[in-house]
Amino acid sequence: GENVEQHPSTLSVQEGDSAVIKCTYSDSASNYFPWYKQELGKGPQLIIDIRSNVGEKKDQRIAVTLNKTAKHFSLHITETQPEDSAVYFCAAPKGSGYALNFGKGTSLLVTP
Amino acid sequence: DSGVTQTPKHLITATGQRVTLRCSPRSGDLSVYWYQQSLDQGLQFLIQYYNGEERAKGNILERFSAQQFPDLHSELNLSSLELGDSALYFCASSGQGSMNTEAFFGQGTRLTVV
């Protein structure tokens, strides 16, 4: 199987709080896990990715953690700002690795 | 701006018709991927081309076809359109033969079938 499950589907936080989005994947051979942000009327944009040889990666306010044993990975956004409001997608390679399977997305709303 | 250009941005057409969506990848990128985004199915991979050749197929219907031209731009052809084909269609490109690296998405074409 090549499914990517993503939770929650919606998330509302107050400005300054942290947000966590979780994904699980089924293919143990998967080795690349990107996160995309999609703003209204735009295409998905890569915000951070992690490869299977590391357990955590951080870029300013965003971080991703990977647990290969449990086959899940998470996106953490700290000190959220209203401009973080968007739909976030996790993804993992399809069986052959040529393309990506995407989760169903998490609609994040950051309220001032 | 991702560098991936899709035209048109919006398309409204009737059932049974045929349309062509166009994608110009980022300069130098050899791979083009087509995705369909709908509310109930999310982002679904349709097909990939690499340097003019079809490389991988996803959930693409037989009524749909694509090609990549020598200048690396790609077209997605949708025929015998049904109401359920209404969706956002995205093109993405990457420099390598897979999405195991950063892939850049265009702004999409919103197709409405009436």
Image (tube, coloured by chain):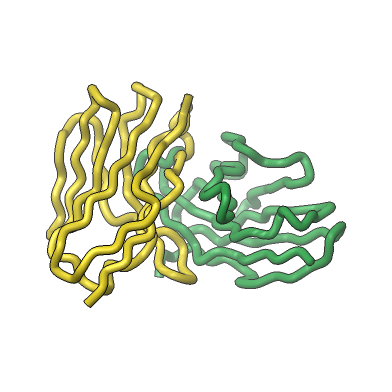
Residue at point 35%, 28% (across, down): A30
Query: Observer-nearest residue: B92 or A26?
Result: A26
Name the side, left or right, on which A33 lies relative to A101: left
Quarter of the N terminus of chain B within the rendering: bottom left
Name the side, left or right, on which A36 lies relative to B46: left
Residue at point 27%, 73% (across, down): A83
Q: Residue furthest right?
A: B16
Numbered disc total? 0
Q: Which chain does green denote in the image?
A: B
Query: Observer-nearest residue: A68 or B53?
Result: A68
Where in the figure is residue B3, as x and y percent of width and height? 44, 65
Name the side, left or right, on which A32 lies relative to B8: left
Quarter of the C terminus of chain B within the rendering: bottom right
- Colour of chain A in the rendered structure image: yellow
Where in the figure is residue A76, as x and y percent of width and height? 19, 51
Q: Quadrant of residue B49?
A: top right
Residue at point 64%, 70% (across, down): B8
Query: Observer-nearest residue: B6 or B36?
Result: B36
Where in the figure is residue A72, as x and y percent of width and height? 28, 33
* Residue B36 in sight in this render: yes
* Residue B33 in sight in this render: no
Q: Quadrant of residue A60?
A: bottom left
Taking A14 as reference, is B58 above or below it? above
Residue at point 40%, 38% (across, down): A5
